[in-house]
Image (cartoon, rainbow, N blue to C red):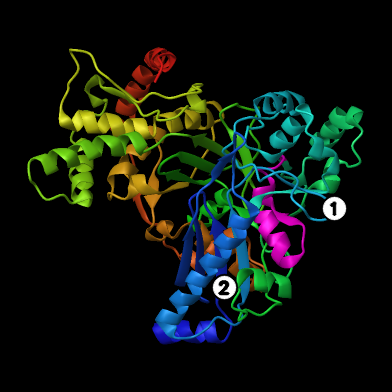
Amino acid sequence: MKSDAKSTIETGKAVLGIEFGSTRIKAVLIDQENKPIAQGSHTWENQLADGLWTYSTEAVWYGIQDCYANLRSNVKKQYDIEIETLAAIGISAMMHGYMPFNKNAEILVPFRTWRNTNTGQAATALSDLFVYNIPLRWSISHLYQAILDNEEHVKDIDYLTTLAGYVHWQITGEKVLGIGDASGMLPIDSQTKNYAAKMVDKFNSLIAPKGYGWKLQDILPKVLSAGNNAGFLTPEGAQKLDVSGHLKAGIPVCPPEGDAGTGMVATNAVKQRTGNVSAGTSSFSMIVLEKELSKPYEMIDMVTTPDGSPVAMVHCNNCTSDLNAWVNLFKEYQELMGIPVDMDEIYGRLYNHALTGNTDCGGLISYNYISGEPITGLAEGRPLFVRSANDKFNLANFMRAHLYASVGALKIGNDILFKEEKIKVDRITGHGGLFKTEGVGQRILAAAINSPISVMKTAGEGGAWGIALLASYLVHNSSKQSLADFLDERVFAGDAGVEVSPTAEEVTGFNSYIQKYMAGLPIEETAVKFKK
């Protein structure tokens, strides 16, 4: 009820979550029942500067201030009040990347985001040194690449953090990081819930000949698990958030987290033997493990939940972009025929019609590689549709092949977990654009990874809601529940969403499709060799 929400805000009991996404900064205000009651946003874009993707620190602060101002106006419009104080705040952002600072808290080089791929030499060397898969986008890869490139600034590093860690530090004065975000800087030891000590020692020995005045453990943020105190909003921090001056200092702030962690929280997938799949422009799956994997795999990143459980992450660069491009052809056809266009109807009709096709797509294959795909070893991509004269070429099979392609690379990565590592999962939750047409993307993904898939209405609330929930966990957990129990009982309250299980025929059909898909990869490799 509106009056309850107004009272929650007026009495300072609302909780604020802010997340820096790649194209949007979003703020969500939640009540004591953990339900959203107001929101704000700011659109921004990364810049290519000197060959590297970045966001300026000026853009960070303008963005968060504009986002907060947008939230204030939303509160004013709905409830005709100002936000004066809050129960708690949480900051989240894109994981990984590189933000090094000197002793005067000045950034030494422009923020290098997760999107940069200039770290290949470093990532390979560290993966060999650590006997652990170290992806290109991890902070330690960026640091070591800067060392290999003899960059002048490295000797002056006093602090190295992520985007979420930077904003948190600036508003609280605390150099800390949530364990999930920290696990994208450097591997975490799931026993000590801290950076892996042996890897820290190996790195220090590796760079010792350089004679820098710092050790790795001295420049990294302190690691905190969900529920730990991570500081309070300072007067300077309050001014940095709310330039109008209404927001008061002293508000508790939870450990800053990465977008992977907030996605797990927003889909109630932090318990061991649960997982989530995010499927939109790109896709990734996060499976919470009971123990570490038996060995490193190049296509599987190991991170953690916000409370420190090991997570196997399969990240794919391509998902729905090529599928959307084909759907747009049908939109053009309708316009050409003078038929009114309703994109939801076009998607709904085409997606549901796909389910009437052959479970192996009648032999048709699609490669949805708008960009390169590390899972299948391709540095560049060329979208391709492949068929032979004898395949069953009809609309249902055509659409089904493109839906299969959207999760094809994801299946290849997850097959390692389920077939080679024999990982057991009780529940996987899907969220993102692929699941917008009810039941279809869900059924396709269930067939791909041979597992029941749940979709919840709340999954669309996203990472800003996820970090708000972590802030709520900080201040509303007097009974000392685990994060998983808090989410189960206080947030989702038995709502497991709508679950779809694959049929044996669908699983067999997808397996048949993926065999042809793998066999046809040389066609894609040959296409990449052609100039654009």
Q: Of callouts 2 and 1, which one flags the residue occurring earlier in the amino acid sequence?
A: 2
Mark 1, other Cα within 10 Å: few <14 / some 14–19 / many ≥20: few
> Which residue occupies the foreground of this view, 331 or 391?
331
Taking the spot 46% from the left edge, 76% from the top edge, the residue there is: 73
**Residue 498 drawn above or below residue 89:** above
Residue 294 belongs to magenta span = no
Return the residue at label 1.
103
**Image coords of residue 35 (percent x, y):** 46, 71
Q: Residue furthest front?
A: 50
Q: In the picture, which quadrant includes the N terminus?
A: bottom left
Q: Look at the image and tell me whether residue 476 can be seen.
A: no
- Side (left or right) of 209 relative to 313: right
Taking the spot 60% from the left edge, 27% from the top edge, the residue there is: 297
Return the residue at label 2.
15
Residue 125, picture quadrant: top right
> Which residue occupies the foreground of this view, 350 or 156?
156
Give the residues drawn in magenta, as a range: 164-187
Secondary-structure class at tag 1: loop
- Side (left or right) of 341 relative to 436: left
Q: Look at the image and tell me whether residue 322 can be seen.
A: yes
Q: In the picture, which quadrant includes the C terminus?
A: top left
**Image coords of residue 129 (percent x, y):** 76, 25
Please give the label number shown on residue 230. Answer: none
C-alpha span from label 2 to label 1? 33 Å
**Image coords of residue 449 (percent x, y):** 41, 34
Residue 168, picture quadrant: bottom right
Residue 180 belongs to magenta span = yes
